[in-house]
Amino acid sequence: MSTVILGGGLSGLSAAYYLLKTHPKHSVQLLEASTRLGGWIKSNTLNNNIIFEEGPRTIRPHGLAAYNTLSLIQEIGLESSVIPIHSTAPAAKNRMIYADGQLHLLPSSISSIFKVMSPFSKPLVWYLMHDFIAQKQTVKDESIYDFCNRRFGTEVADYLISPMICGICAGNSKEISVKFLMKTLFEYEQKYGNIYKGLIRNLFNNSPKTELSKLAKRAKVERWSVYSFKDGLESLPRAIEQYIKKKDISIELNAKCKSIELYPRNITVHLDNGKSIDASQMISSISSEELSQLLKNQHPDLSTLLEKIKSVTVAVVNLQYNKKLLPKEGFGFLVPPKERLPILGVIFDSSCFPNGENTVLTVMMGGAWFQELFGKQCDKEYILNLAQEHLKLMLGINEQPENVKVNILEKCIPQYTVGHNENVEKIQKYIKENKLPLALCGSSYYGVGVNDVILSSKNAVEQLC
């Protein structure tokens, strides 16, 4: 049996890891279009050991998908490099939003939900209790903004949910499906009339049990909030790469696909360099939009479904200053879209992972509003100047940074808009009905987080094998 894996980002590398783990005699070939593996995860280390993260920077340690990631980390021998942020640290407790011209601390404890905390006009518990009187609306799917606006009120939708969606997927909460983050709560409303009835009815349901790895148990005991690695998050794809290179795998860089012939019993991948590769099955970890173009001629209906899953572009600005400049330590802050600012959020990297008398910040810009704000011809110098202007406005930082890096990550985060789950079901139905030896993984389908991506790769391997 031979398998070709499209894409050498975290999901493609994870797929190779699980495939070689469960089927060590398999012939596996991984194709990556660029000059490096790791995808959107990229950690740049400066001369003074400061790390600039271009993409994701932390991983959550809780939940089944998270436990799976922690097991993988332990299996590849990376656990000694883990750096956790504990739940008692300022970076775990202090998460903020910028609204009405100032920073506001979000509720982070049981006692805080009973207090009035600006920009909310009432205690958070008041909005949560609103669910008891909110009217049920029977729908197949809706935006997460509309759902939260109906169940908890406009202030929760504007100041809690909308900025959170900006931080997770750089998206517009008025377009993102409620099933992206709140599928269970949405189903409770649809089945029981409100969320709390659903919570009570399912209070004693036995959740799936899983045997925790030693590292997962440590994360629970030590109460990790999130974690990363000593040399940045890119340590994870690098470690997986080194692990699978010891196995029987062929990895080819600069291997850009031109088209794919996909039949029930075999696959042929045609590369731009004129080379063709035959295999008995394929795992695609590239974006749905990219895969759509490769299947357009032979499978136009599947191509159309894949093309519906769009991605947004994010500008990432990393800045390092040689002194402490933050007015308050914390994870950082997000900006509600209603503020109509070009900033999605700012991460306080030096607060999350302190490194001497430095201030390290990451400014995220654009996302769902990238074209509207910056157009197609985006200038990096303009992006940098805009970021610094807003850091002065929001944090009072007037100093010039010692080091900066600006990256424009084109189509980096898929958007799970209303109807996404139904569309993915149609994609899988087409693959099954046409008996195609194809499995899908990566951020386009089952979650955009690191844990989701790795678990999707494991499930893709199980589906094929």
Image (spheres, grey):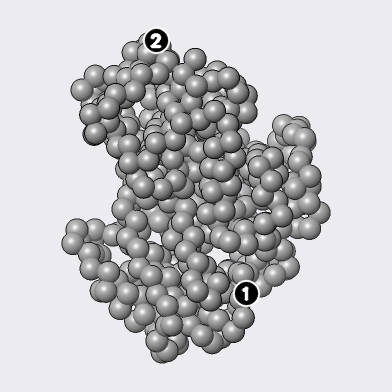
Residue 382 at x, y percent in the picture: 25, 74
Q: Position of residue 430 (x, y in %)?
A: 37, 18
The reply to whether dot 2 and dot 1 touch (C-beta < 8 Å) is no
Please tell me whether residue 435 is drawn above or below residue 463 in the rendered image: above
Q: Please, what is the three-letter code of the amino acid marked with disc 1?
A: Pro
Image coordinates of residue 364 in percent, x first then y, are 40, 65
User: Helix, strand or loop at disc 1?
Assistant: loop
For the C terminus, the image quarter is top right
As drawn, the residue found furthest toward the right would be 221
| Residue 342 vs residue 388, the one in the foreground | 388
Mark 1, Cα crowd under 10 Å, few <14 / some 14-19 / many 20+, is few
* Residue 362 image label: none
Residue drawn where x is 43% and y is 51% of the image: 40
The residue positioned 36% from the left and 80% from the top of the image is 388
Q: Nearer the viewer, residue 335 or 125?
A: 335
Q: Nearer the viewer, residue 218 or 91?
A: 218
Quadrant of the image occupied by residue 260: top left
Up-down relation of residue 67 to residue 160 (above or below): above
Q: Secondary structure at mark 2?
A: loop
Q: Looking at the picture, which amino acid does disc 2 mark?
A: Arg
Look at 31% across and 53% down and name the residue there. Answer: 410
Where is residue 277, by image quadrant? top left
Q: Residue at x 24, y 19 (%)?
A: 298
What is the total number of numbered labels drawn onto the structure image? 2
Relative placement, left or right, of 263 versus 178 is: left
Q: Which residue is mark 2?
A: 265
Badge 2 crowding class, 10 Å Cα cut-off, few under 14, some 14 to 19, many 20 or more, is few
Q: Which mark is residue 354?
A: 1
Q: CA distance from mark 2 to mark 1?
A: 53 Å
